[in-house]
Image (spheres, helix red, strand yellow):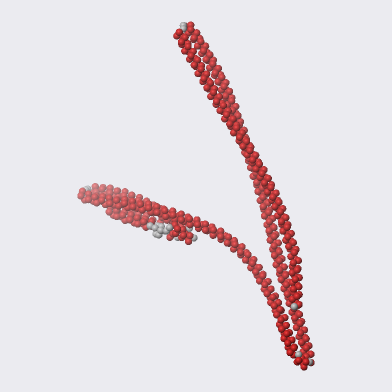
Amino acid sequence: MGPKKGKGKKEKKAKGGGGKKGAPEVNDAERESEAERLELAKQAKALLELTRKEEQAFNEFQQQREKINYFWIVEKKNFEDRKAELRNKERERQDLEEKHQVEIKQRVKHLLYEHQNEITNVKKGVESSSLWLSIESLSIELKMVGVYVMICLEMEKSMKLSQDDYRGNERELKTDKRRLKFDLKEIELSHQDYLKSLKQEQDRRITVLRQEFERHAKELQQKYERKRKAFRDDLETRRKQDTQKIEERKNLHIAQLMTAHEKAFGEIKNYYNDITHNNLDLIKSLKEEVSEMKKKEAQDEKLMFEISQENKRMSEPLKRALLDVEKLRKNIRVYQDEKVELRTAKAQLLVLEQEHATLAWEFEVLQQRAAQVARELEELTAQFHGSIYDVQQKTGLKNLLLEKKMGALTLQLEQKDAELNEVLLHAKLDPAIVDRVKGRLEDIMVNKAEDLRELEQEMAHIAKLQSDLAAAMQLKMSEYGLPLDELGFTPQTRAALQARTATSNNYNNNSSRGKVSVATTSLAKEAHLAKTRAAASSSMIPAKPQTSFGVTANATTAQ
């Protein structure tokens, strides 16, 4: 029981020492937080002062802008007033010119009227009076003519003077107009220069402020980066100190336990040694007192049993203490291993989080691309089916027309051939005439063969367009990774089309030579057209119709 009490006292002392060591650490943390708070308050004040300066500069720029706008409005109003004055002066000048012309016309009319009256009066006087009166009237008429001439000269002088005045006024108005335009242009140029200088000054200030803010931001970033690094280093040192303190505490506790257990073991050993010595002494004394000890044998056996039980009871705490020491050592090793595993798990967690973010982003991008590809596939499928149906309708219609034309031509050819043979048989013509007729017939057949060649070339062109469309569709589907079964039909290859074209060319060459008979030519043409129609119809027949929904579903499954 004594060792246990000593152990409790030592643990209390260790706990008290740990509390005294923790108090300065708390004070240091409080002082650091207070210093950091004061520094943040200083930074906030500096930022408030900087924002106040920025607001003041903004207000100054706003006032300058309002002044410039006010000056611009005033000058614009002055310019409009000057333009109105110029228009009024021009209108007054035109009114004066019109008024002057009207006055001159009225004066001339009055003079002409008076002159006509005088002429009529003179004529009446000549008829009624004598020669003297006629002479007097002639003199009066001459005077009136002189007066009229004088009046005309005065009017011309006055008109010249008024014209000179009007020209002078017009020159003055033009000079005023030019001067006003020149002043307006100078004002506009001065305003433009002023606006340009203001813009340059504003740009310069903005660049200076931007550079200052960028520099300040870099300084703040560097400052807080240093603080963060220092804080991280401080935390790392604290963590190391804490782990070191914990290890020291554990080592101290282990040492205390070891000393306590050693002390208890020594006490137990001394106790057992004393017991054994006492027992030996008792044995020696009891040899002398055998008779007395026999009486006390039962008591001694009982005492020995109690002593053995006490020995067993005292050996069990020693075993438990040794087991506790071994467990604590194992716990230390496990703690070290768990620290290493925790560090590796944190690193793996960061890597996995980054991979998860990138995979999520890639998944979203792939989903969007899949939706876009599905939409494009639907559109291309609809367009392709529409173009296929259009080509089928056109080719079917052309094939029907060609069949009808060929049927009619073959019937006409057979009829003409039969009629010609009958005519040649019944006519018994000269062989030269027969050769000439046959030559003309061969020319007609050559022309028909050329028409047929043109039709076949058109058919080959349509087949080429079809093969190009099929190749483009195959290329597009291979680009998107889709199988050819999704088309809904089997596209015709270029090799089959080339073989069919070569056959038609050989046939055209043979038919153009004119060495075969009419019946053989018609049969070959019919056979060739039948082959061409069969090949075209087989290339245009869909294998299995599919809806746009099925194509989209297959495309999604393929992706």
In percent of width and height, residue 476 lies at: 46, 56
Residue situated in front as seen by the camera: 379 or 426: 379
Residue situated in front as seen by the camera: 269 or 176: 269
In percent of width and height, residue 361 lies at: 56, 58
Quarter of the figure with the N terminus = bottom right
Q: Residue furthest bottom?
A: 291
- The image shows a total of numbered marks equal to 0
The residue located at (29%, 53%) in the rendering is 522
The residue located at (72%, 70%) in the rendering is 249
Q: Is residue 162 visible?
A: yes
Q: Is residue 34 left or right of residue 506?
A: right
In percent of width and height, residue 231 lies at: 69, 60
The residue located at (73%, 87%) in the rendering is 302
Q: Is residue 493 visible?
A: no
Up the image or down, 220 lies above or below 85; here it is below
Q: Is residue 551 left or right of residue 415?
A: right
In percent of width and height, residue 528 lies at: 33, 55
Q: Is residue 483 left or right of residue 276?
A: left
Q: Which quadrant of the figure has residue 240? A: bottom right
Q: Which quadrant of the figure has residue 297? A: bottom right
